[in-house]
Image: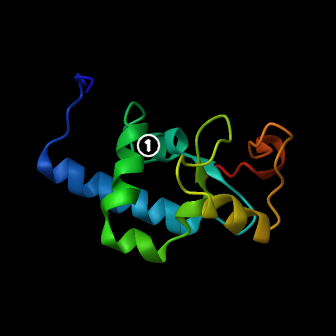
Amino acid sequence: MRDYPDTMSPEQARTFRNDVLNIVGQIPSGRVTTYGIIAAWAGWPSHSRMVGRTLRYAPEAASLPCHRVVNKEGRTAPGWSRQRVLLEEEGVAFRPNGHVDMQRHLWEP
């Protein structure tokens, strides 16, 4: 794992976690945002992977629209085929390469 020069203290990690969950809870239906955008809005722009870990392991994330978070290219999470189905049910369009049409559906808080 990469050694970040801006390592979080336990208190900062709790705040980051809460911020991530709060931001994800605000993503409107039919829109997506990226791990990187969430990390930046939470104040830690180099921690996009930590956003993914937070969403995977925080029990509260199960009640949030985590399916609306994709990578910067619009790719869905590997191994979660239901994510695309959930997004399509909300009207999110995909390009021929299987990525979300980010020009149409990107949401930035």
Viewed as shown, does residue 16 lie left or right of 100? left
- Which image quarter is the N terminus in? top left
Determine the image quadrant of residue 88: bottom right
Viewed as shown, does residue 105 lie left or right of 67? right
Determine the image quadrant of residue 60: bottom left
For the residue pair 104 and 1, the one nearer the viewer reads as 1
- Callout 1 amino acid: Ala
Viewed as shown, does residue 45 lie left or right of 66? left
Position in image of residue 103 (x %, y %): 82, 41
Q: Residue furthest bottom?
A: 63
Question: What residue did someone put label 1 on?
Answer: 39
Position in image of residue 12 (x %, y %): 21, 48
Q: Residue furthest left?
A: 10
Please rate how many residues cluster around mark 1, counting C-alpha atoms within 10 Å: few if below 14, some from 14 to 19, many from 20: many
What residue is drawn where x is 39% and y is 39%? 49
For the residue pair 102 and 76, the one nearer the viewer reads as 76
For the residue pair 53 and 14, the one nearer the viewer reads as 53
79 shown above or below 27: above
Q: How is the image coloured?
A: rainbow
Disc 1, SS:
helix
Position in image of residue 64 (x %, y %): 49, 72
Determine the image quadrant of residue 47: top left
Looking at the rendered structure, the number of numbered marks drawn on it comes to: 1
41 shown above or below 64: above
Position in image of residue 31 (x %, y %): 72, 59
What residue is drawn where x is 55% and y is 57%? 80
